[in-house]
Amino acid sequence: METTQYDNKTLFKYLRWVFIIAWVMQVAIWMLYQNGGVLPGQLLMSVMMYVPLLAVLISGVKLRGMGWKPKFKGNIGTLLFSWFGPYILTLIGAVLYFAIFQKHLDLTGQYVMAASGEAGEAAMKTLEAQGLTYSTYMLITSVASAFYAPLLNMLAAIGEEVGWRGYMNPVLKEKYGRTKGIIIGGIIWGMWHWPLIGFIGYEYGPSYFGFPVTGMLVFCIFTITLGILCDMVYEKSGCIWFPAIFHGSINAAATIPIALCVPDTGNYRLLGPAPNGVLAGLPIIIIAILIFKSRYFSTRTE
């Protein structure tokens, strides 16, 4: 992994394009949602994950030197953390959330039926016809999200990681120093999602106190802490695929506690049960703070 040299013009060109393209797409997603096109909107959200990669290319940044060749020697521990760490931390956070808010736990599939309507009801009937309970189905899904979903999701997450970890974070750390660079990078990553949070209630729904500003701020806490972990994984491995696996793993794991929760929890959605909530996200926040304060970061200070 080569050191990215700071260049003010290139950085701002990257930031300009990464926001313009993504925010235009998010307006399009909102319009699709307004007209009943939820599925096309979700597909467009998946495509949007490649915008940071596109912005890197438009800005003239070279992709070589980002660590494209997998490096397993000496990195098995980092690989295992990238693959299973998000799942374990998400599980701990969900257990903490449901232990406090026990009435929010639902094993009957209310969330799926509320989110998918008739399609959700049909899916539940299909499960019953196969002799499967919703809890059994979620157990199978949980195993899948832990073992092979991170690898599949990595193929989409690499689009973001090339932009955030491969280019932007190294440049911000070089310009502002390690501490400020990582925090600024996390805020930018969170802001990149803001239109969706405001338009369609992305991640937290539309019914919490201070919508959408409080959701935007809480999501930035999540992206800062997640950014610390992704950055650590990238620096330790020297391979861009490792933070992509981590990113893919957290995306997969986050869907599980949501599917086990009652559909509308209002203000509580800012707390969990997904790891982007303040309470359910405590395991990730604590690990991120410990890493941030550890020798790993302090020995590479500004």
Image (spheres, helix red, strand yellow):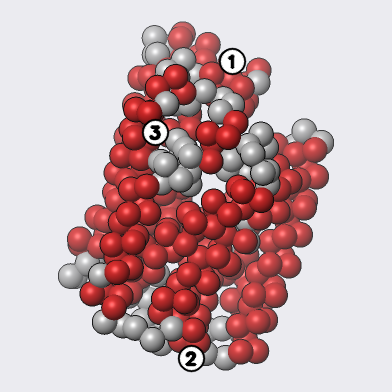
| Residue type at tag 2 | Gln
Q: Earlier in the sequence, mark 3 or mark 1?
A: 3
Residue 284 at x, y = what percent?
A: 36, 52
Q: How far apart are marks 3 and 2 (CA)?
A: 43 Å
For the view shown, which residue lies furthest in the front direction?
209
Residue 262 at x, y = what percent?
A: 52, 23
Instruction: Quadrant for residue 79, please give it.
Output: bottom left
Query: Is 132 located above or below residue 171 in the figure?
Result: above
Q: Name the residue under label 2.
A: 5
Residue that appears at 49% across and 19% down: 109
Instruction: Quadrant for residue 106, please give it.
Output: top left
Q: Nearer the viewer, residue 79 or 110?
A: 110
Residue that appears at 80% across and 38% down: 34
Q: Mark 1 points at which residue?
A: 121
| Residue type at tag 1 | Glu
Q: Earlier in the sequence, mark 3 or mark 2?
A: 2
User: Callout 3 environment at 10 Å: few (<14), some (14 to 19), or many (20+)?
Assistant: many
Q: Distance between the residues labelled 2 and 1?
A: 54 Å
For the view shown, which residue lies furthest in the left direction?
74
Front: mark 3 or 2: 3
Any mark on residue 97, and which?
A: 3
Label 2: state its secondary structure.
loop
Residue 254 at x, y = what percent?
A: 44, 41
Instruction: Quadrant for residue 141, please give it.
Output: top left
Query: Is 241 located above or below residue 280 in the figure?
Result: below
Front: mark 3 or 1: 3
